[in-house]
Amino acid sequence: QVQLVESGGGLVQPGGSLRLSCAASGFTFSSYPMSWVRQAPGKGLEWVSDINSGGDSSYYADSAKGRFTISRDNAKNTLYLQMNSLKPEDTAVYYCAIGPREKYTYWGQGTQVTVSS
């Protein structure tokens, strides 16, 4: 069955960095665009970034541009999100999802990112 397992979250100080990973299994990972979405406390899902199946085209929400980088390793069936210059407003549960922006068909259980001093 389809599985998406996120990891790499944690507590980080403002200005710090984290690298999230999403291990995919149960489907042909290299055939699908993938997204990162997040949900802050008390708020709805927010699209963060997506990447095409080949990994050569990506898009970012304005809140992520210049600070976050999405990438994928199709040989390892893994999606990544490098997050730099983190801000308290980046605090959220981060999910990887199959599909491009707002066309998700499946997402994982999420990983908590907390940005606080």
Image (cartoon, rainbow, N blue to C red):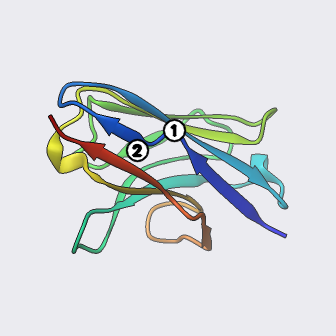
Q: Could one spot residue 19 in this view of the protein?
A: yes
Kindly identify which numbered label has been placed on residue 24: none
Image quarter hosting the C terminus: top left
Q: Amino acid at mark 2?
A: Tyr
Earlier residue among tags 1 and 2: 1
Against 96, residue 60 (above or below) is: above
Q: Could one spot residue 62 in this view of the protein?
A: no
- Other residues around mark 1 within 10 Å, as few (<14) / some (14–19) / many (≥20): some
Real-space Cα distance between discs 1 and 2?
A: 21 Å
| Residue identified by numbered label 1 | 8
Query: Image point 73% across, 51% down: which residue?
Result: 24
Query: Image point 69% across, 40% down: which residue?
Result: 78
- Image location of residue 71, percent across then percent down: 55, 33
Query: Image point 26% across, 29% down: which residue?
Result: 66
Foreground mark, 1 or 2, reads 1
41 sits left or right of 98 in the view = left
77 sits left or right of 87 in the view = right
| Residue identified by numbered label 2 | 59
- Image location of residue 15, percent across then percent down: 19, 25
- Observer-nearest residue: 114 or 50? 114
Q: Amino acid at mark 1?
A: Gly
Name which quarter of the figure residue 101 lies in: bottom left
Q: Are marks 1 and 2 in contact (CB under 8 Å)?
A: no
Query: Image point 85% across, 70% down: which residue?
Result: 1
- Image location of residue 23, percent across then percent down: 70, 46
103 sits left or right of 98 in the view = left
Helix, strand or loop under label 1: loop
